[in-house]
Amino acid sequence: MNPGKALLRQDMMPHILCPGCGHGIVMSALVRVLAKRYASLDQVALVAGIGCSSRVVGYIDANTLHTTHGRALSFATGLKLARPELTVIVVTGDGDGLGIGGNHLIHAARRNVDLTCILFNNETYGMTGGQLAPTTVTQAFTTTTPYGNHESAFDATALVTAAGATFVARAQAYRPDLLEGLIEQALDHRGFSFLDVLTDCTEYFSRKNQLGAGSDLLFSQTRSDTEISLDLTEWPRLQEPDGFPVRNLMPMGVLHESNRPTLEEVMELPGYRPKEG
Ligand code: SF4
C-alpha cells in the first residue's frame, strides 16, 4: 500500500477538487514528504484558512485546524507558541494568505516563527468564484476583471524576504519531485520558511482566459522556469507571449536563506527544540 495513503482520511473522500486542478499534485507531494519523515503525525499540525487549497488539510490525518479566512498564520503562531514541540505547517492560497491574510504573512515572516507556510498560488480566488487575486497576472480575465487585469501581481517571495523570512523558495505543481525536495528543506529550516507553489485553477482562471485543460495549465508553468527549456511547437498558445497571460520567467528553487533567532528562542519557550539548520 502507498505509505502516503495511510495518512489520508478516507472518510473525507471524495475530495472537492475539480478535475485537472493542480492542488491535488501539491497535496500529494506534501503527503509523500510527511509519510517519509514521520511514522505518526501525532506531533504534526496542519493549519489552513479558507479556500480550495486550505480545504486539503481536512484530507490528511494529522492535527488539523481549518480556521477563518486569511487567519491561518495567526492561529498557527498561537499554536506554535503554546505547543512549541509541534511541527506546524500552514497551508494557504494566494487569496487567503497573500490577499486577505497578507498582513499576517508579513508579520509571521518578521517574527521568524519556526513554522512552514506553503502558499498554493493559482492566481485566483477559486472557491469563491474566480475573483482577482494579488497574484493575478496583468491582462488576465477574472470574474472581477471582465476587461482584463490592469494591476501588477505581487511577488510573494520578494515580499516575505523583505519582511524577514529566513527560508524562501518557489516551486511548481509541474515538477512534484522538485517540490518535494523544497518542502523537505523548508521543514528542516529553523525559523519561518515560505514556499510559493505555482499551481492552477482549471474551473475559473482557465475558463476565463481560455487556457485549456489541466495539462495545458501545468505545461504553461514551464514558461515560469528559467531552468527548464522545452519544445513548445506542440503547444501553440504558449508561443503567444503577448496574448497568453502566464507567469513569465519567475525563478525557482531556494531564493533566500538566512539565519537569525526564532521567536521561540527569543522568548526562551520551554519545550522548544531548535532544529540544527
Ligand atoms: S475552483 Fe479552481 S482552485 Fe478550486 S478546486 Fe476547482 S480548479 Fe481547483
Image (cartoon, grey):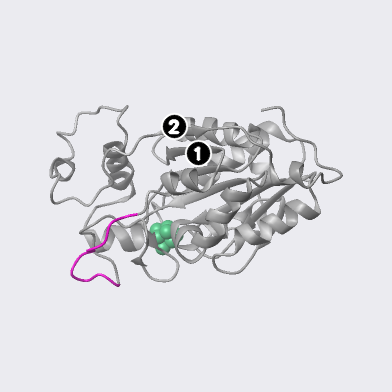
Q: Residue sitting at 48 percent across and 30 percent down?
A: 177
Splitting the image into 4 quarters, where does residue 116 fall? top right
| Residue identifier under label 2 | 253
| Residue identifier under label 1 | 168
In reply to whether residue 149 is colored magenta, the answer given is yes
Q: Position of residue 74 (x, y in %)?
A: 64, 61
Cα separation, mark 2 vs mark 1, equals 9 Å
User: Which residues fall within the magenta stretch?
Assistant: 144-153
Residue 8 sits above or below residue 207 on the image: above
Where disc 2 sits, the SS reads strand
- Amino acid type assigned to the residue bearing label 1 in the image: Val
The quarter of the rendering in which ligand 1 is drawn is: bottom left
Splitting the image into 4 quarters, where does residue 264 fall? top right
Predominant SS of the magenta segment: loop
Q: Residues within 10 Å of mark 2 (few under 14, many from 20)?
A: some
Whether residues under marks 2 and 1 lie with C-beta atoms below 8 angstroms apart, the answer is no
Left or right side of 139 for 51 = right
Residue 49 sits above or below residue 194 on the image: below
Q: Residue sitting at 69 percent across and 32 percent down?
A: 37
Label 2 or label 1, whichever comes before in sequence order: 1
